Image (cartoon, coloured by chain):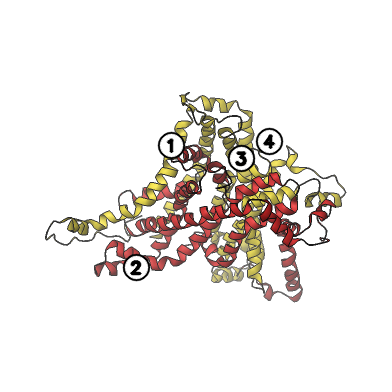
Chain colours: A red, B yellow
Amino acid sequence: MFPTPVARLDRRWQTLYKLALPVSLVFWLLPLLAVMLTSIRSAGDLAAGNYWGWPRDFSLVENYTAVFENSPIGAYILNSFKVTIPTVIGAVGLSCLTGFAFGIYRFKGGLLLFFLFVAGNFVPFQILMVPVRDLTLKLGLYDTTLGLVLFHVAFQTGFCTLFMRNFIRALPFELIEAARVEGATEWQIFLRVVMPLMRPAIAALSVLVFTFIWNDYFWATVLVQGKHALPVTAGLYSLNGQWLAAWHLVSAGSIVAALPPVVMFFLMQKHFIAGLTLGATKG
Amino acid sequence: MSASSPAQEGHCPPALHSSGADIWRRNQRRLAPYLFLAPGAIMFAVYVVVPIFQSMWISLYDWDGIGEKTFIGLANYVELFDDDAFYTSLKNNIIWLVLYMLAVPAGLAIALFLNQTVFGIRLVKSLFFFPFVLSQVVVGLVFAWFYDPGFGLLAELFKAFGTKPIAILADEDYVTYGIIAAGLWPQIAYCMILYLTGLNNISSEQIEAGRLDGARGLSMLWHVILPQLKPATFIAVVVTVIGALRSFDLVSIMTDGGPYGSSRVLAYYMYEQALSEYGYRMGYGASIAVVLFAIMIVYISIFLVRMIAEDRERR
């Protein structure tokens, strides 16, 4: 293990390390802790200029209720779910198919197509913006959650395909050969042999795509305008304009908006990190 | 994919009768990959591949997004050459690219700091990674507030040292650096997690061997550890470059490109031109996007070349 485990060092270093950990953590999360503290601060506290001191009175319930009652944030969050969940299902589902195709078969143009999927992943969004907006308008899906879902599914399929293909390649190929010998059709092999083994990959991709899409801001501003379809990221930005200087509300709103991916991350941490660090280690 | 790729030519059973089902049976292994690919490939083509070419084509037109397009050849690009705002954006993009790279060594430093096995370290690691899970909108709001000259924490720090607080986001000289610092927060977390995973997979024999050879501390890091972390470093650099070039969210949330357009980047300037409140200039916006794409294509090629090489190596 590198660096040398502190357990092997002398007592003084161990104590120092155990002290340095929480201190650095507080420092690292300082902006976030400030927001959390402010979200439970009362308006009076802020008006009196007490921004950073200990709150004189706590109004956790009041602030969070106010956020939901005085703003459409509840609707925004619902919209975010309406965009995120179908996208996760769509993108992961499609990439199971494409990943299977690239991982199992050798076919003409396969490599080229695969690299197209990978390269498409890195493209700046702006080069897609004008045509995708135009297409969404023409389909009559501008300002709807479905319009966002379709684009996100297509775009995320690129990343997911790379992931699935590498995962399927690592499976023992004998399984597939054995199934073929037994006369299974290709579809049966996909459904009965490969799919059950892909559960960890599906879990990892689902949490990752969930977070990416939940946090998307650019496409939410490009493809949606109205309150009825606006996801919470773009919604929060517009609320920030309305809540000028009502920092206790802005911070409570931010925390509400951030919560779903955060919960997802802590629940599925292992899968999340497995997905994110794909390729960071050899093989 | 090289010769040892898993799929092999299957031998077809002799045809007894040539019904449709039989043709399918005999050819299914040849047709299957295309059928499995079709849904994903069609979606990807319609929403990603084709739009890239459409944008290139639109960049040759004068178009407000609704009416008729007028072909103007390279006039949009010629205009870019004389556009100060374009140069400001380009310059800022370069600053972003350079400073964003700090996320890589900073992520490595934190990973080294946290690569221990003391009690509660798993939770500490997750909490360090935490900023990456937050939306850039939240990060932007948090930092805009952190920088506020009236009551922000930074202003308090300035006051504590007895200097006048600087309004970072309202100052043309500091604004871009202020936004980059906000962007670095989640990016460092990302690089950290890549390195933590990398460190986890380092062979302990090599470390012991290095120790026997007298390598310690920095020389151990340089000669033994870093070479083994190469895959992590590569991914960290790639995602950091992409993050730097994609920097739209934070600029939009923290400053809207201001003050006086001094914090614009290409991604933001493109959006502003194409969908601005003063009328849509889709053609001009598309030409900015094409420039951004051209910059990105360099990095995409590097990535692909390396991926192909690795693919060959592996089988």
Judge the density around disc 1: few (<14), some (14-19), many (≥20) Cα neighbours within 10 Å. Answer: some
Please count the marks in the image: 4
Mark 4–mark 3 CB contact (< 8 Å): no
Mark 2 sits on what residue?
A: A193
* Mark 4, residue position: B262
* Front disc: 4 or 2: 2
Q: Are marks 4 and 3 on the same chain?
A: yes
Residue denoted by label 1 = B53
For label 4, the crowd category at 10 Å Cα-Cα, with few meaning under 14, some 14 to 19 and many 20 or more, is many
Give the CA distance from mark 2 to mark 1: 39 Å
Counting from the top left corner in percent of width and height, residue A204 is at 50, 63
For marks 1 and 4 on the same chain, the one whose residue lies earlier in the sequence: 1
Determine the chain carrying the residue at label 2: A
What's under tag 3, amino acid-wise?
Asn
Mark 4 or mark 3: name the one nearer the start of the chain: 3
Mark 2: which amino acid? Val
Task: Identify the residue at image location x=63%, y=69%.
Answer: B122
Q: Residue at x 48, y 54 (%)?
A: A87
- Asked if disc 4 and disc 2 are in contact, CB closer than 8 Å, the reply is no
Classify A84 as above or below A139.
below
Mark 4, mark 3: which one is toward the viewer?
4
Question: Do marks 2 and 1 share a chain?
Answer: no
Q: Chain of mark 3?
A: B
- Asked if badges 1 and 4 are on one and the same chain, I answer yes
Label 3: which residue? B93
Disc 1/disc 4 C-alpha distance (Å): 30 Å
Residue B222 visible in the current orientation = no
Give the answer, above or below, for where B68 lies relative to B190.
above
